[in-house]
Amino acid sequence: MPDSPTNFDRLRPREDQLKAFGFIQAAQGYEWRGILPKTRLEITVRVDKNGQVSAELRDPQSGGTYILHRVAGASGKFVGQVRREYEDILARIAASCFEKDVFKSRQAKELIVYAREKYNDELEFLWKQFPGNAVLRRKDTGKWYAALL
């Protein structure tokens, strides 16, 4: 059974970025396959049509699903390495292919789309302690022209 990683909470996939990363369109959304470099396990990451992410690891020698990285009590050098590589690739996918999706109102969504299409501007989330607040700023002066709170 695939894992539903939490790295993608409050994020929305960007179709153009998924394709640029190497995801291919599948029947239920998008799919990406790779090999974890040090442990040589195969990873499959799926993004369904609703933006839900699932991931699965397989042992290429046995063909079986690898799940020990999800077992809290599992320890050891190999399991630790698998966890690190698994989290690293998911973090890379989240950073490369997804955008924050914290604003739910119609007006906020329209403003974000307008700024993207008209000025090629993206939201900037400046404050760690306020992850739901963002600004839009001019590229030439660096001054904010909108704050979404």
Image: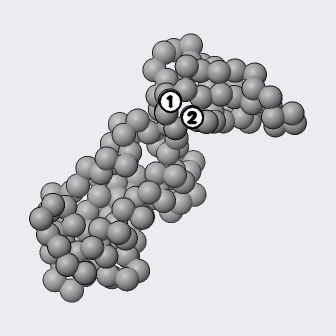
Where residue 37 appears, as percent x and y from the top left, is 41, 80
Is 30 in front, or is 139?
Answer: 139
In the picture, the quarter occupied by the C terminus is: top right
Q: Seen in the image, is 122 located left or right of residue 40?
A: right
Colour pattern of the rendering: one colour
Where residue 76 appears, as percent x and y from the top left, is 20, 78
Where residue 68 appears, as percent x and y from the top left, is 16, 69
Please say whether residue 113 is visible from this viewpoint: no
Q: Seen in the image, is 39 located left or right of residue 96?
A: left
Q: Is residue 88 above or below residue 77?
A: above
- Please give the residue where the numbered disc 2 appears in the rendered image: 127
Is 105 in front, or is 19?
Answer: 105
Which residue is drawn at the image coordinates 59% and 21% (left, top)? 148
Where residue 77 appears, as percent x and y from the top left, is 25, 81
Which residue is drawn at the image coordinates 47% and 43% (left, top)? 13
Q: What's the residue type where badge 1 is placed? A: Phe
Whole-angstrom CA distance, mark 1 to mark 2, is: 5 Å
Tag 1 secondary structure: loop
Q: Contact (CB < 8 A) between labels 1 and 2?
A: yes
Task: Tell me the tag on residue 59.
Answer: none
Is 144 in front, or is 106?
Answer: 144
Which residue is drawn at the image coordinates 50% and 29% (left, top)? 130
- Please give the residue where the numbered disc 1 appears in the rendered image: 130
Q: What's the residue type where badge 2 is placed? A: Trp
